[in-house]
Amino acid sequence: MYWVKILQGLQRRLRPQSFNSWFRPTVQFYEDDRRVQILIPSKFFREVIQRSYAQDIQACIQEAQLPPKELEFLTNEELEKAHAREMTTDGGLNPIYTFENFVVGVSNQAAHAASTAVADHPGHVYNPLFIYGGVGLGKTHLLHAIGNRISQNRPDLRVIYVSCDALMNQLVEAYQRGNVHDLRQYYRAADVLLLDDVHTLAGKERTQEEVFSIFNILYQAQKQIVLTADQPPQALANLEERLVSRFSWGLIADIQPPELETRIAILHKKAMLMGVHIPDDVALFIAERIVDNVRTLEGALRRLVFLASMKSQTLSIELAREAITPLLESLSRPTPGPTLGSAPMRISIQDVIRAVATYFKLSPEELVSRTNRPQVVYPRQIAMYLARHHLEASLNEIGQAFGGKHHTTVMYAIRKIEENLHSDPRLQQDLHGIFQILRPSSE
């Protein structure tokens, strides 16, 4: 394999610590005449590899006399989206996502049942259907499964799937070209609209206005609408109240992280689809250690199968340990950013809440309240981020400390800070100021 030959060269060129940290966790996933797709644990890996090791990689390509190819470093999520784009139908549906290959467990049973009901009786039950849950738990899978079943059973119905990010980009392009009317008509003519990741509409007023208009027209015509988000409607920040209200008109179903039995079943199902057999003890070993979401679980299985193929071995616990150790390390590695020093932290979540409230001139009660005022939401997101990455508190612990908020609300807040950590000078300044308040209580 192309990437394996590069890795062999890098192992000779680099110090063991550098190679083990940044390249051993990578896995070649796909190769054709033009490109090679490499699975990486996180976007941070891509930044480091491209910034610090591009010349070493190029040297290894030349030494091995490999033909020039584009190297794509992709996270598991990006890899799924890339292949989904290549396989989608005209309506945006990905045919590989069906109810038949969706593993049902206690954590997703309600959402699955509601989805099948909608797919079998579009426009007549649970309209709209709103599915929420954390990243990588199967929301998008269910959306496509609904669309695929309806398209199969009712080919006369027009089914459209779109993510809100894609819709926003379509609108921007339509405004530039002056054909917004055509785009509106396209969506208003849908019999079934599957709208993914509506939480990304936050703060995008023009797109919210278009979604509101499309929603009203389709709903009044008794067309089926299904939406997904990382939080329930009432917890979505920076969305118009009238939109949040409409999202709540039908059934709201959540998906929780899969329990152990479901994680094991997912591994067996995915292995079968990949054409390999995973022994029960190996599936249990992985499922006990990777608990956050299905996407990470699939990434671990892909890496295990790759290692087994490369070493001509069967799937075993020893090989599974080698496969998942780098993934576990990357999951537990704190997001790069300001720290309170190398000394162990001796502060609590309440200390963080008080420090953030003091810095932003709020009361601790305001910070943990249910208000979605921007002047409170931003400080609250910072406080949740600090509790997660610097105190290593669990999502549930943080949610309880902030007035009983759902763990998906906490996940969303943390991700917002992570996304802006390196590019937002104001955020960096705010973190520094909060650390100055916290530091005396941690020394």
Image (tube, rainbow, N blue to C red):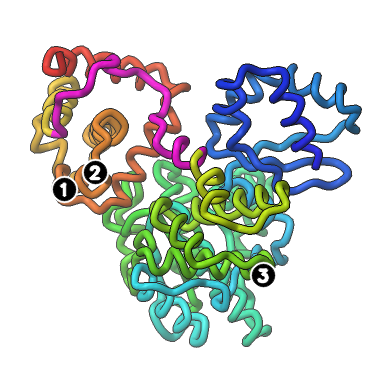
Q: Can residue 149 be seen in this view?
A: yes
370 inside magenta stretch: no
- State which region is magenta: 326-349
Under tag 1, what secondary structure? helix
Q: What residue type is labelled 2?
A: Asn
Using residue 251 as the reference point, say whether residue 196 is left or right of it.
right
Q: Give the image quarter of residue 57.
A: top right
Question: Which class describes the residues within 10 Å of circle 1: few (<14), some (14-19), or many (20+)?
Answer: few
Using residue 233 as the reference point, say whether residue 153 is left or right of it.
right
Residue 400 is tagged as: 1
Residue 121, x across and y down, in percent: 49, 87
Residue 392, x across and y down, in percent: 27, 35
355 vs 73: above or below: above
Under tag 2, what secondary structure? loop
Q: Determine which residue is flagged by label 2.
A: 372
Question: Which label sits in the foreground, 3 or 2?
Answer: 3
Q: Earlier in the sequence, mark 3 or mark 2?
A: 3
275 vs 223: above or below: above
Q: Quadrant of the C terminus?
A: top left
Disc 3 to disc 2: CB gap under 8 Å: no
Work out whether residue 21 or residue 169 is closer to the camera in this orientation and state it.
21
Q: Determine which residue is flagged by label 3.
A: 95
52 vs 118: above or below: above
Under tag 3, what secondary structure? loop
Residue 429, x across and y down, in percent: 32, 15
Question: CA gap, disc 3 to disc 2?
Answer: 38 Å
